Amino acid sequence: MLKLALFGDPIEHSLSPAIHRRFGQQTGIELDYSAIRANTSDFGPRFAAFLVAGGQGANLTVPLKHEGLGVCQQVDHSARAARAVNTLVKRDDGWHGHNTDGTGLMLDLQRLQLHPGGKRILVIGAGGAVAGILGPMLAMHPALVVILNRTGSRAQTLAEKFARRGVVIGGGFDQAADLEGFDLLIQATSSGHGEALPPLDRKWLKEEAVGYDLNYGPAHRGFARWCAHHCLPGHDGLGMLVGQAALAFEIWTGRQPDMEPVLADVRAAQATP
Ligand code: ATR
């Protein structure tokens, strides 16, 4: 039995245990995936207790993704670039840390036939989520990535950090007046949790552009409404959630689960009040 756990706070409503249970059923791998509430002050002892109990792999969510770096003997380039770990696996030489968030998004964009290669991509937000997606996104060779953020300096700093990997520019909304011709709009702020939206402008986008929100559920509603109002397909981030989980499952088991039926289940469960 593979012993796995999700650490974070809050985790009560996390969909990850159900997703991994479904992946286990699909692949015939027996696993015990529990959700352990932990924050930055008690993560150390809780993780140590999990290890003593035979823990072999873990996921980390808010507020522990940065904390995860401290328990790893090795981290992959995605986790290093994002300064955040969302997946831990125990190997012979200790814990290895990965960040599957960005590759999870790329997996979902491919599923949606939204290949970033050669595209002009506008990313709204410059927090931890964006730091996680920029590396995998630039590896797909988009023509241009522009990051816009409420705090322009944060977007600028992030763009400078990734400048060696592709054409990426960052700034504030006050610098957005002349933007146009984008194929893909990625909503990566946490503003949806307060039902607010950043100041988006349809004229930045091509007629046939597509919107993608890293959020899902109630936090996606504002962006969904904006996209519908501006006649733009607007996807939520449930596919990214299942995609990052599928990549974590593969790291733990070496098996690639089929994300489509699990995504359909999760979406159906979300729609049921
Ligand atoms: P995450 O890990 O989810 O990216 P974060 O690092 O706290 O979380 O970043 C949150 C992002 O949402 C930031 O880009 C933040 O903008 P600031 O850098 O200016 O704080 C953005 N954000 C949050 N609420 C917002 C709002 N109401 N309007 C616009 N942007 C908002």
Image (cartoon, rainbow, N blue to C red):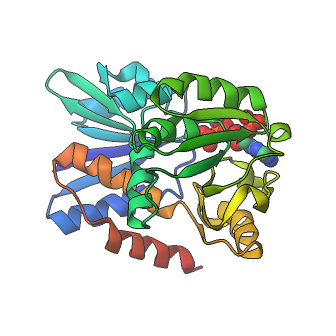
Give the side of residue 126 with respect to residue 266, left or right: right
Quadrant assignment, res 140: top left
| Number of numbered discs overlaid on the protein picture | 0
Quadrant assignment, res 257: bottom left
Taking depth in this image into account, of 166 and 86 the one nearest to the observer is 166
| Residue 236 position (above or below residue 77) | below
Of the four image quadrants, the one with ligand 1 is: top right
| Residue 37 position (above or below residue 113) | above
Residue 95 in picture, x, y percent from top left: 27, 26
Taking depth in this image into account, of 62 and 152 the one nearest to the observer is 152
Q: Which residue is at 43% across, 42% downward?
A: 141
Q: Which residue is at 22% across, 44% downward?
A: 252
Q: Which residue is at 35% across, 45% downward?
A: 5
Taking depth in this image into account, of 171 and 80 the one nearest to the observer is 171
Q: Is residue 107 visible?
A: yes
Quadrant assignment, res 50: top left
Where's the C terminus, which quadrant? Answer: bottom right
Residue 99 in picture, x, y percent from top left: 40, 37
Residue 197 in picture, x, y percent from top left: 79, 55
| Residue 89 position (above or below residue 263) | above
Q: Is residue 37 visible?
A: no
Give the side of residue 26 with respect to residue 38, left or right: left
Q: Which residue is at 60% across, 23% downward?
A: 160
Residue 110 in picture, x, y percent from top left: 39, 60
